[in-house]
Image (cartoon, rainbow, N blue to C red):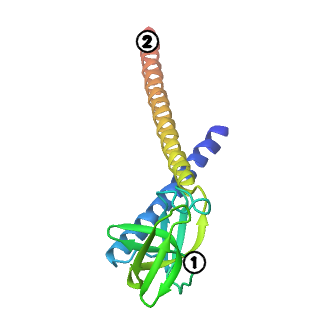
Amino acid sequence: MIKKIFKYFLVACLLIYILILLAFLVLAFVSKFRNDNSFFGYQFLIVGSDSMQPNISSGDLLIIKKAPYKVGDIVCCQVGSFKIAHRIIEINGNTITLKGDNLDTTETVNSSQIIGTVVKTIKNASLYINVIIFCGLVLIFACLVYYFISHKRRKQQLAKTKYDKLINKLDYKKQKLKK
């Protein structure tokens, strides 16, 4: 009974994990097909530097939305091939001056480079993502081990059943010959 429950639990977890992965893959494909990296108007960015410490650290996940911005807001903008998230310290028409909280230097960008305003920060999101990936891999490994063990047992049971049938046939033939 416990084996069946364990089997159904593993299969259910694996199916849920696969469905979540498929959903993310479909969303990624659709956003690339539309040339839009947003998901219902929101974009996600994992921070790669500590330029906004102590508020935002490397490994945090920023949720960005195209919204009006003002001095003091943290915005994400495209600078060359990089996306940066810094605080607005000055707005002069289309020219916006940004500065990282942990930096001494400033950047000047055009308003067309602004991707959106940071609306939410999820601390240590890269750690959570890595844990989810690791748990998924452990789950897949457990399912494979369970499959191979149960498959080997089924083969052994099948071989034993065939052996028992063969022995019964031989016993029957011996009894028939004795008569």
Q: Nearer the viewer, residue 34 or 76?
A: 76
Q: Nearer the viewer, residue 129 or 16?
A: 129
Q: Quadrant of residue 35?
A: bottom left
**Which residue in the protein does label 2 denote?**
174
Q: Mark 2 or mark 1, which is nearer to you?
A: 1
What amino acid type is highlighted by mark number 1?
Answer: Asp
Q: Is residue 51 above or below residue 39?
A: above
Distance between the Cα atoms at labels 2 and 1?
A: 93 Å
Tell me what residue is drawn at x 48 percent, y 40 percent. 141
- Residue that protrudes farthest toward the bottom in the picture: 93
The quadrant the N terminus occupies is top right
In x, y percent, where is residue 40?
50, 79
Q: Which mark is residue 92?
A: none
Mark 1 packing: few (<14 Cα in 10 Å), some, or many (20+)?
some
Give the secondary structure at mark 2.
helix
Tell me what residue is drawn at x 61 percent, y 48 percent. 9
- Residue that protrudes farthest toward the right in the picture: 1
- Residue that protrudes farthest toward the top in the picture: 178
In x, y percent, where is residue 31?
38, 74
In x, y percent, where is residue 85?
49, 69
Asked if disc 2 and disc 1 are in contact, CB closer than 8 Å, the reply is: no
Tell me what residue is drawn at x 55 percent, y 61 percent. 102
Q: Is residue 179 above or below residue 67?
A: above
Mark 2 packing: few (<14 Cα in 10 Å), some, or many (20+)?
few
In x, y percent, where is residue 140?
48, 44
Q: Nearer the viewer, residue 80 or 100?
A: 100
Task: Inspect this view and state whether residue 1 appears.
Answer: no
- Residue that protrudes farthest toward the front in the picture: 104
Q: Which mark is residue 73?
A: 1
What amino acid type is highlighted by mark number 2?
Answer: Lys
**Mark 2 or mark 1: whose residue is earlier in sequence:** 1
Tell me what residue is drawn at x 49 percent, y 80 percent. 41
